[in-house]
Image (spheres, grey):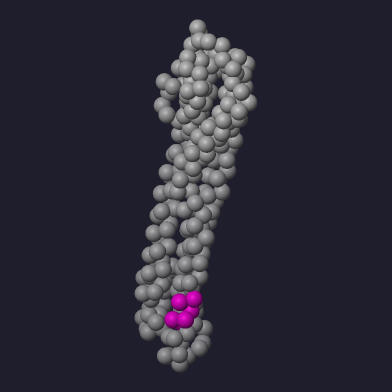
Amino acid sequence: MTLQAGGAVPTSSLDLIRVSSAETQIVLAVIALFSLITWFLIGLKWWQLRKVRRQADRFFGELERTTRLKEAYHAVMKLPPSPYNRTFREGVHFLQELHPGALRDDGPKITMSPTHVEAMKMVLSKEIAAERDLMARFVPWLATIGSVSPLLGLMGTVLGVMDAFIGIAIKGSGNISAVAPGVAEALVTTVAGLATAIPAIIAYNLFVNRIRLIVSELEGFANEVIGTMAREGLF
């Protein structure tokens, strides 16, 4: 044990890390890697979900300027790809596959059976599920890191305490000055694990809630698309 072998008594967390055992430094290195991954994912998902929110505002802004489904389709398809226009496109394409020319002004009068309506709902639900999975990509890693990091910290603490007891046995002294440095070193990994896990868990909960709201908005929009088709006599 480095701290029991002699030398200056550490006076800060950095000193504890610098003079810690190899096992402790390995655990701290893994936790540090997890921390870097956590903050990278937080930045990435925050940027992605913020982009989706801007796309949604622009998408619904374009929809408000149109009065018919055909006009809305041509307007939003000019926008950059987003979960909203991809969902809209899937619904319209399904309608056109069943009835080519359905969106033409001079198109024939069409009738969709309840089975076709249910099939369209399934198509839209499938697209929404795909968009949800795309937005949630890598988010479970935050939950994993949030769960594993404290356990890694605890493992480092146990190893550090074991190392401290070995050092005490070698020195043959059990007073507080001999025990305290080793215990302090052992607790560094616990602090590091918690410092990594807390932002990971907070970010995970925030992102899951944000994705849930977006998915709810997509589901409401899909129902609105079907209602618009019914109102315009497309089925």
Residue at left offset 48%, top offset 79%: 161
What residue is drawn where x is 38% and y is 65%? 29
Q: Name the residue nearer the viewer: 79 or 145.
A: 79
The quarter of the picture where residue 109 lies is top right
Give coordinates of residue 206: x percent, y percent. 55, 45
Q: Residue at x 56, y 33 (%)?
A: 122
Where 15 sits versus 48, above or below? below
| Picture layout, residue 204 above or below residue 94 | below
Residue 81 seen in this snapshot: yes
Does the rendering let one see residue 70? no
How many numbered tags mark residues here? Answer: 0
In this rendering, would 30 be left or right of 124?
Answer: left
Q: Which residues are magenta?
A: 158-164
Picture quadrant where residue 210 is located: top right
Q: Position of residue 121 (x, y in %)?
A: 58, 31
Q: Position of residue 55 (x, y in %)?
A: 47, 29
How far across and down, in percent of the image, does residue 87 sit?
Answer: 50, 29
Q: Residue at x 50, y 10 (%)?
A: 107
Quadrant where the N terminus lies?
A: bottom left
Q: Is residue 162 magenta?
A: yes
As drawn, 125 above or below 205: above
The quadrant of the picture occupied by the C terminus is top right
Q: Main secondary structure of the magenta part?
A: helix
Farthest residue in the bottom direction?
172
Examine the structure image and report whether residue 52 is included in the region drawn in magenta.
no
